[in-house]
Amino acid sequence: MLSTRLGAAAIALVIGAPDPGFQQPLDEEGRFVNLDGTGPGSFARVLRWLVIDSITGNRRRSPATAPVPHVEPDVAALARPPGRGQGARVTWIGHASFLVQLDGVSLLVDPVLEPSLFGGLSRNVPPGLSYEQLPHVDAVLISHSHYDHLDLPTLKRVGAPVVAGLGLRKLIRKEGLPCATVGWWQTLRFGAVTVTFVPAHHWSRRWLSDANRSLWGGFVIQGPSATIYHAGDTGWFDGFAEIGRRFPSIDAALLPIGAYDPEWLMAPFHMNPEEALRAFADLGARTFVAMHWGTFKQTDEPLDEPPVRLEAERKRLGLPAARVRVLAIGETLEVTRRPVATGAAAPAGG
């Protein structure tokens, strides 16, 4: 058990029992795999992209920078999370980093606030919240081990307890931080808020020898005020429909739309905008919130292309603009729970 504080009241993080009968998928070497049994992509395919395709001119070339909308956050409003039943707020910090606030709790998901990543990849745009602008953070949620989602310098400066996938406790505790690790469909409670770690279709690695030794996933954050889903890093997979079945009242789905080109390499692990809207439909969520674009130049598409494709697909599908949101970095979206029809089943708790 871990504990942190919200005002004067202690919040306990209690690990719930995994879904009865669910066995975490592992390969013969004990490494984590996706629900369909697949592991990380071939390193030879990555070399083909980085070396051979570069030499032969088969890579799409695009600038390393692009304009991305950025607004000043309302720091005074963010200093205190909404109370129980008063709605929720999601603030885009950039890439997959969000501040999620509801029912008296403030959570950071995949925070990366440093000017560059390990290896030297620099930000295209500053983070939407600086360290000094962050409110009290009750916990940090880490979707997986890749450097653009698990940034140890950021975690150390934030200093809050960490929740991450199985296999990451040792790495995070070496930094002096409390850490609870969870498997898919496992739930923790923060006061009135529950957080469930759910499957994604991805992989993990920080070093040459640790591929898939830690688990990846997304988070369903559920309280009396709203249900918010953060997909982590993922390709499209059948699991979105299962997440939607278990959590039938997702009010906001934070879904990645970038890092997809070349698709012959990236498609298993990163969605393009059209696939992200397909995932949104599978989830049955009310509002789409775009992420994982515009901050780091990781792949070949222009940094500002993903929202253009997303808007074109939204129009093709006939979705109302209010349901598909592309926030500016630093922008906050107010989220309220959707009305539940008379006689409808209550949302699942994971």
Image: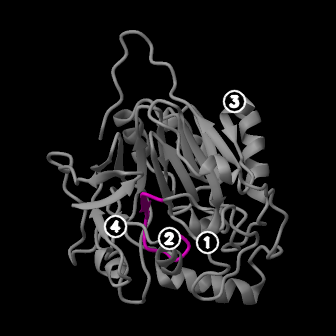
Of the residues under marks 4 and 2, which one precedes in the sequence? 2
Of the residues under marks 1 and 3, which one precedes in the sequence? 1
What residue sits right under mark 1 in the picture? 113
Of badges 4 and 2, the one in the foreground is: 2
- Residue at 76% x, 69% y is 125
Left or right of 150: which side holds 217?
A: left
Q: Residues within 10 Å of mark 4 (few under 14, many from 20)?
A: many
Is residue 88 within the magenta segment? no
Residue in front for this viewpoint, 308 or 265: 308
Of the residues under marks 3 and 4, which one precedes in the sequence? 4
SS at mark 3? loop
- Residue at 60% x, 81% y is 117
SS at mark 1? loop
Of the residues under marks 2 and 1, which one precedes in the sequence? 1
In the rendered view, tell whether residue 158 sits above or below residue 195: below
Is residue 144 within the magenta segment? yes
Q: What amino acid is found at the position of numbered circle 3 in the picture?
A: Leu
Q: Residue 294 appears at what percent x and percent y? A: 73, 63
- Distance (Cα) linking label 4 and label 2: 23 Å
Q: What amino acid is found at the position of numbered circle 1 in the picture?
A: Leu
Residue 215, disc: 4
- Can residue 234 be seen here? The reply is no
What residue sits right under mark 2 in the picture? 158
State the residue lying farthest toward the left: 21
Residue in front for this viewpoint, 33 or 188: 188
Q: Residue 302 appears at what percent x and percent y? A: 78, 66
The magenta stretch is 137-149
Q: Residues within 10 Å of mark 1 (few under 14, many from 20)?
A: many
